[in-house]
Image (cartoon, rainbow, N blue to C red):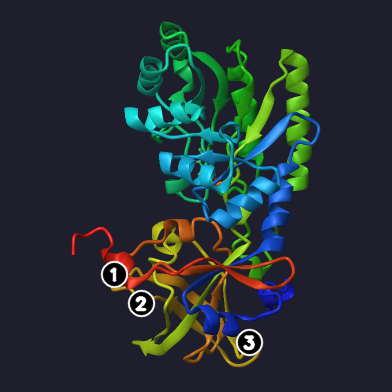
Amino acid sequence: MISYTEQMNYFGNTNPDALAEKYGTPLYVYNENILRRQMKRVAGVLPNHRFTANFSIKTNSNLTILKMALEEGLNADAMSPGEIYVLKKAGFPSDRIFYVPNNVSEEEMQYAIDEGVMTSLDSLSQIEMYGRLCPGGRISVRLNPGVGAGHHEKVVTAGKKTKFGVAAQDIAKIQEVAKKYDLHIVGLNQHIGSLFMDYKNYLEAVHNFLHYAEDFDELEFLDFGGGYGTPYHKLEGEAEFDIESFKTELDALLTEWKEKSGKDVLFKMEPGRYVVAEGGVILGRVHAVKENYGHKYVGTDVGMNVLIRPAMYDSWHDVEIYRDGKPVLDGETGEYTVVGNICESGDIIAKDREIVAPKEKDIVVVLDAGAYGFSMCSNYNNRLRPAEVLIKSNGEDVLIRSRDTFEDLVRHFDV
Ligand SMILES: *Cc1c(COP(=O)(O)O)cnc(C)c1O
């Protein structure tokens, strides 16, 4: 057995037991070196073109991490007024924010207009709404090219059966509505889905998208969406997303299109998971080990309120066991299911894993939890959302978000 966190020196000058002692569990722990490495990778996807990578902050909106993204030259995608607000707090200027909402109210649309943030419109009715609120404005339109991709039905975000975008066959109608309100369509965007390791479908979607783009005269940018995958089975040796080959093929496709179409636009992408997934883990404490009718369980404090992905998408997260500050790699193994402390039978973090027999007080480390981890946490069962800690490049640990308190649970009641 190998330990990814040990190989990466993930915990710097400290270790999981010391962190658990100092900050309590469950605990999100991020690694600055890994986060910055990924940010640099996405910032450099198209070095030969005018390009910006927009970090999709629904994956992780910790202010410290957002500031890091700003420093690494990333722009940001916001899905809601709250995300615009948080980005502003992190220091992002309006022209580095792209608002990609769907089904928003007039107030939520007006918020972006007042903030001077470029907005993507997701339906003919939302284009109408924008036109009424801001005639003569500059907009982007989200196209649904009719094909999607992703690791689970719930994360495929284009195609004939999803709610997103305006169907490509409605391009004439888009232009009609825009004309009615004198709107300038300066951008087109798409996002076909999440977590692909094979980029073939993505390139095909880009290819189709470029074709549609030729029907628009005022384009200043084209945004191809996010979705680059993360190797969640890394303990079994799953390879990383091959970003170098992806870059080469995408570059060739775009160079050819620019020559053919004579258009010189800014290209954008919207990676989320790829930027932050691997730079985050969760530490949990083992509080019980038991066997029910032949099934072995490791009972921890990492409930589904701390990490919903396994329950929601059947997602796989690798787990490691630490004891006395070191990974437990030798000893008798068994097949264990790692569960949390929530009153739901679906409260499972990792099912049927061959691991060295854990003991009470051990630390379980859940890997690749930096994306759609904390950002999807809840207070279900009136559990407290965890604290977040950063292992800085110099190896020191620092608290970057406090744990909820009992007072937080009643803050919105008149008691
Ligand atoms: C979620 C989302 C992204 C990011 O997707 P990842 O799979 O995390 O890269 C990008 N764009 C839009 C519009 C999204 O909704």
The residue identified by callout 3 is 325
Q: Is residue 24 left or right of residue 1?
A: left
Q: Is residue 12 left or right of residue 131?
A: right
- Locate residue 233, reporting x and y percent: 61, 65
Disc 1, SS: helix
Q: Residue at x 62, y 93 (%)?
A: 331
Indicate the amino acid at tag 3.
Gly
Q: Amino acid at mark 1?
A: Asn
Disc on the earlier residue, 1 or 3 = 3
Between residues 34 and 224, which one lies in front from this camera angle? 34
Q: CA distance from mark 2 to mark 3?
A: 23 Å
**Label 3: how many residues lie within 10 Å, few (<14), some (14-19) or many (20+)?**
some
* Quarter holding residue 178: top left
Q: Give me the residue at 68% from left, 73% from top.
A: 396
Give the quadrant of the C terminus.
bottom left
Secondary structure beneath dot 3 equals: loop
Q: Earlier in the sequence, mark 1 or mark 2?
A: 2
Q: CA distance from mark 1 to mark 3?
A: 30 Å
Circles 1 and 2: CB atoms closer than 8 Å: yes
Mark 2: which amino acid? Asn
Residue beneath disc 1: 381
Can you name the residue that lies furthest to the front here? 415
Residue 108 sits above or below residue 376 on the image: above
Query: Picture quarter containing residue 231?
Result: bottom right
Residue 341's mark? 2
Residue 404 x/y as whole percent: 39, 68
Q: Nearer the viewer, mark 1 or mark 2?
A: 1
Whether label 1 touches label 3, CB < 8 Å: no
Q: For mark 1, does the 10 Å Cα neighbourhood hold few (<14), some (14 to 19), or many (20 or more) residues?
A: few
